Image: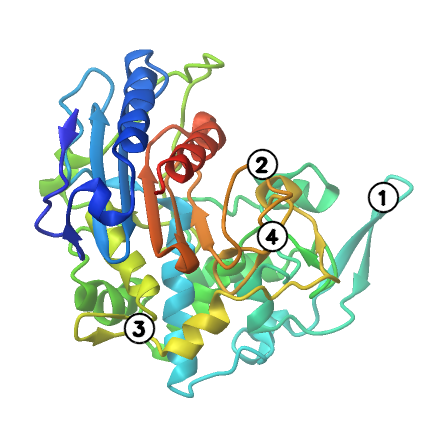
Amino acid sequence: MNDHRASSSSAFAATAPEEAGLTAAGVSRLTAVMQRQVDARHVPGVSMLIARGGKVGYRRDIGALRPDGPPLPGDAIFRIYSMTKPIVSVALMMLVEEGRLFIGDPLAKFVPEFANPRVGVEKDGKLELVAAERPITVQDLLRHTSGLTYAFTGVSAVQRLYAKARLGAPDLTNAQLVAALAKLPLIDQPGTSWDYGHSTDVVGRIIEIVSGQSLGAFLQERILTPLGMSDTAFFVPPDKQDRVAKPFAKDPDTGETVTLTETNFESGGGGLWSTMDDYERFAQMLYLGGALGNTRLLGRKTLEFMTADHLGPHVRIGTAFLLAPGHGFGLGFAVRREVGLAPTPGTPGEFFWGGIAGTAFWIAPKEELIAMMMIQAPGQRDYYRQLFRILVHAALA
C-alpha cells in the first residue's frame, strides 16, 4: 500500500483526515476493506482520493499497477473511458459561453446528415422507421435524450443495427463516426427518453466543427494545459507506457477474458487516459465553480446550469441500469435528486459519472466533498462503485 497524501501535483492541500472532516476510523476501514479486496485478487489495484472543504484528507494507492506487477504508483495512468464525457461537455459549454452556439440549436445546423432523423419502432417482430417528431438539439446530446444509443446497453432491433455498423472500429475519425450514426435509426423520439449512447461523441464532433480544431487539440489548448493536466490525453506516448494500469487477463468472477477497447480516434464519449492527480484538478475546478487558481474555464452560473437536472419528471429513463432511482441527468453529469430511493447514500445536488473500466468520481457541494476512485476492472465496476460510496459516506464526520 502506498500513501500519496502529500502528492505535489494535487490541486488542494493535503491534511490529516480529521482536519478534512473525515473520521480516522472511517478512512482506516476504507483502506482495510480495499486491501482485502486486493489480497483476494478481486482487483489488481485501487487508487482513491477524498477531499472536503478544499483539503485532501485521504489519498491511497493499494495493490499493483498490473497483475503481478509493481506497486500501484501515485501517477498511474488509467483508461477513464466515459469520464471523458464531463470534460468534453465542459469544452462544449465553453464555446456556448463564447457565443459560438446555443444548446437549443438543432444538431443538423452543424451536421446536415441529421436533418431528417428516423426513429426505429418494433412492431410484430419487425423494425419500422418513423419520422422524428422534432429535431435533435445540442441539449439532447449533452443530456442523452437524442435517441442515439450504444450497442452494448441492450438488445433491441436498433441496438443490433448499431452492433452491425462497427461504430467502435479503431480507425474511424469523429467525422466518419458521426456520418455513420446519422444513417442509423434513433432508439426513441428526441427529448422523450434518457438513453445512454454516442451522444457525447457527436458533441466532440460539434466542437471540432465550431472551433476548427481537432477535439484533442481543443481540449489540450483550452482545458488540459491550463489546468495542468499533463498526463491526460487520447493517446499514451511510449515514454509513459510503463505507468499504464492494467486489469487481470481473466475476469476474477466469470473467468472470461477481459478486453479493454482501444481506439485510434479522439472519442468524445470515451477516449481519454488520465491520472488521479490530473482528474482531481478537473474535479476541483468543477467544485470551485468553474475556476482553478487563476484559470477560469466556465462561469459559475454556467456550471450551476450544467449540474442541474435537465430531465424532469416527463423524460423516461431508457437505460435504467445506469441511472439509479432518485437521479436525473444534467449537461454531462448524472445528478442526485433525492436522499433516498438510490441503493447507496448521497446528497441532493451532487453530480458524478464514471468509466466502463471502473473509474468514478462525484462532487457533493453541500457536503464540500469530492471523492474519486480509479480501478481497471470492468466486470467489477458496479460492485466497487457501490462499495466505495458506502465506505466514503461512512467516513464523513
State which tag comes first along the sequence, 2 or 4.
4
Task: Between residue 37 and residue 163, name the one nearer to us.
Answer: 37
Label 3 belongs to which residue?
Answer: 213
Q: Where 249 sits versus 353, above or below?
A: above
**Percent coordinates x, y for residue 132 in the rendering:** 76, 67
Kindly report the distance in space between the C-alpha atoms of the residues bearing marks 1 and 2: 37 Å
* Residue 206 image-quadrant placement: bottom left
Q: Where 138 sits versus 192, above or below?
A: below
Kindly report the distance in space between the C-alpha atoms of the residues bearing marks 3 and 2: 42 Å
Label 2 belongs to which residue?
Answer: 343
Residue ID at (60%, 52%):
338
Alpha-carbon neighbours of circle 2 within 10 Å: few (<14), some, or many (≥20)? Answer: few
Q: Identify the secondary structure beneath mark 3.
A: loop
Task: Between residue 153 and residue 174, name the one nearer to us.
Answer: 153
Q: Identify the secondary structure beneath mark 4.
A: loop
Q: Amino acid at mark 2?
A: Pro
Q: Amino acid at mark 1?
A: Lys
